Image: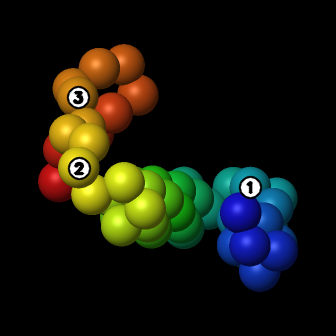
Amino acid sequence: MPQWLCNQLMRAFQNKNRRQIRLLNDSWYFYRTRRSQEEWPDTQSTDGPGKRKF
């Protein structure tokens, strides 16, 4: 996780800003899943615990 994202998440948690926490979490999840699809384009993601569909 990039340092700038860690800093923003820590600030959002300290300020108890739920909207910002959710936005950053969704952004990180989207970035991470998109990146993993680029690295392994042949694999299909399965619907399991912790997986979200957008």
Query: Earlier along the polypeptide chain: callout 3 or callout 1?
Result: 1
Q: Is residue 18 visible?
A: yes
Cα distance, mark 3 to mark 1? 30 Å
Question: Secondary structure beneath disc 3?
Answer: loop
Please provide percent x and percent y for residue 35: 44, 65
- Residue identifier under label 3: 46
Please provide percent x and percent y for residue 53: 18, 44
Residue type (three-letter) at the residue carrying disc 2: Asp
* Mark carried by residue 25: none
Quadrant including the N terminus = bottom right
| Farthest-out residue, front | 42
Q: Is residue 19 visible?
A: no
Callout 3: few (<14), some (14-19), or many (20+) C-alpha neighbours within 10 Å?
Answer: few
Cα distance, mark 2 to mark 1? 37 Å
**What residue is at 26 percent from the left and 42 percent from the top?**
43
- Residue identifier under label 2: 42
Please provide percent x and percent y for residue 47: 21, 26
Quadrant including the C terminus = bottom left
